[in-house]
Image: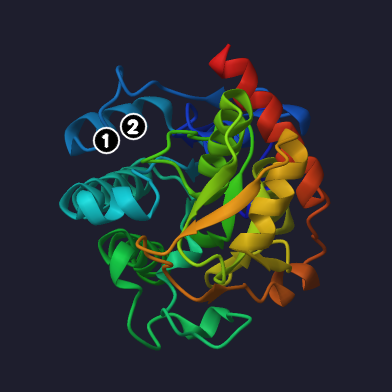
Amino acid sequence: MAAEAIDRDAPVYVAGDSGMVGGALVRRLRAAGHRQIVTCSHAALELRDPAAVQAFMLAQRPAAVFVAAARVGGILANQRYPADFIHDNLMIAANLIHAAHLAGVQWLMMLGSSCIYPRDAPQPIREEQLLAGPLEPSNAAYAVAKIAALELCASYTRQHGRQYLGVLPCNLYGPGDNYDLERGHVLPALLRKAHLAKQDGAEALVVWGSGRPRREFLYVDDLADACVHLMGSGYAGPHLNIGSGQDLSIGELAETVMRVVGFDGRIAFDTSKPDGTPRKLLDVSRLTALGWRATTPLAQGIALAYQDMRSRMA
């Protein structure tokens, strides 16, 4: 069954629906009129257990699968728990992809990450740059697991004629994000820091690193829209970048966050913390050629994320 033939009445399984990306996919699929969206909580299904995953997939037999389940975190979490990051992500990807094949699932999308590209890849990063140089050491374990997942998709496609596709989003943010100061990514962590600084009447917002690295950000509902667009487009090619096509420095990001939050202090850069990769901007020309562009401006998306954070804190 080709991707474009997936019927709105056919079951679509979203693995990781309780997370930020999975939740956005469920919202977008519902908006697109899909009536059978299959989800399962972590408590009910341990994705690191191959027998449990196979039994679940054989019982459900979805027409399509989105793999949005993963162990994720910022620089500090990746540095502290590399074994957890590589083990859990390898197991989740291998179990879900193999179980989908056994259940006869023809179409699957694996959500990867732009951090799998070489640390010093030419900018903007084209899909062909994968494995063209050394990885960023601070998240190498996570990156290797995601690279293996991409190769799994490509291998099941070559050997078994499946349409298993990997997509590589840039930095994501939005409703359902992790705003933990240690485990969260840079944007949600900055939102939390700015909010607390405003509450406490602090003089400065402390930003990790020099503020010079440049990053690209994409609102998570835009990502979900791109994924569902690809499901309906019939695209069955190699892995694909998904991004906004624009980047900014971490210092500029902090200034934008401060404006949204309403914190009028100064920025204090903590240069004892690592910067990570100097720049990450994706070449999204392949995706643009398929008829999709991001639509949510950064300041608007940050305001929506801040509203989400405040409601969850309350």
Residue 121 sits above or below residue 36 on the image:
below
Q: Nearer the viewer, residue 105 or 120?
A: 120
Residue at image location 45% in from the left, 85% down from the top: 120
Residue type, label 1: Gln
Residue 159 sits above or below residue 28 on the image:
below
Residue at image location 77% in from the left, 34% down from the top: 32
Secondary structure beneath dot 2 equals helix
Rendered location of residue 87, percent (x, y):
19, 50
Q: Are marks 1 and 2 in contact (CB under 8 Å)?
A: yes
Residue under label 1 = 54
Rendered location of residue 26, percent (x, y):
61, 30
Residue under label 2 = 58
Q: Nearer the viewer, residue 192 or 89?
A: 192
Q: Quadrant of residue 105?
A: top left
Rendered location of residue 146, percent (x, y):
36, 61
Residue at image location 44% in from the left, 41% down from the top: 184
